[in-house]
Image (cartoon, rainbow, N blue to C red):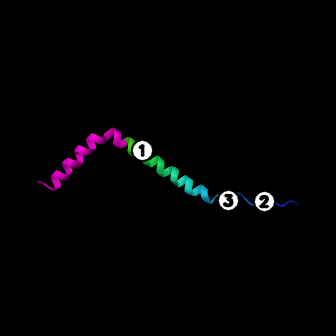
Amino acid sequence: MSRQSPAPSTSGQGIIEFALILLLIAIVVLAILLILGDDLRAFIFDLLNTWFPQ
């Protein structure tokens, strides 16, 4: 009967997957900001002027 070696350690795999997910989210947010940047800035400016008139 031969003994099989234990499975390789996968402790770092979870951290790498988490980092890749965060990177993907950051790229998507950046793309949205590049596409809607001016419209989003105008919307926030109007919203703040509505809530806090000068």
Point out the image quarter for the N terminus: bottom right
The residue furthest right is: 1
The answer to whether marks 2 and 1 mark residues whose Cβ atoms lie closer than 8 Å is no
The 10 Å Cα crowd at callout 1, few under 14, some 14 to 19, many 20 or more, is few
Would residue 44 appear left or right of 2 to someone viewing this image? left
The kind of residue on which mark 1 rests is Val
* Quarter-of-image position of residue 15: bottom right
Magenta segment: 32-54
Q: CA distance from mark 2 to mark 1?
A: 41 Å
* Amino acid at dot 2: Ser
**Chain-order first, disc 1 or disc 3:** 3
Q: Which residue is mark 2?
A: 5
- The mark found on residue 28 in the picture is 1
CB-based contact (under 8 Å), mark 2 and mark 3: no
Secondary structure category for the residue under label 3: loop
Q: Secondary structure at mark 2?
A: loop
Is residue 40 toward the left or the right of residue 53 in the image? right
Real-space CA distance between mark 1 and mark 3, rounded to the nearest whole angstrom: 31 Å
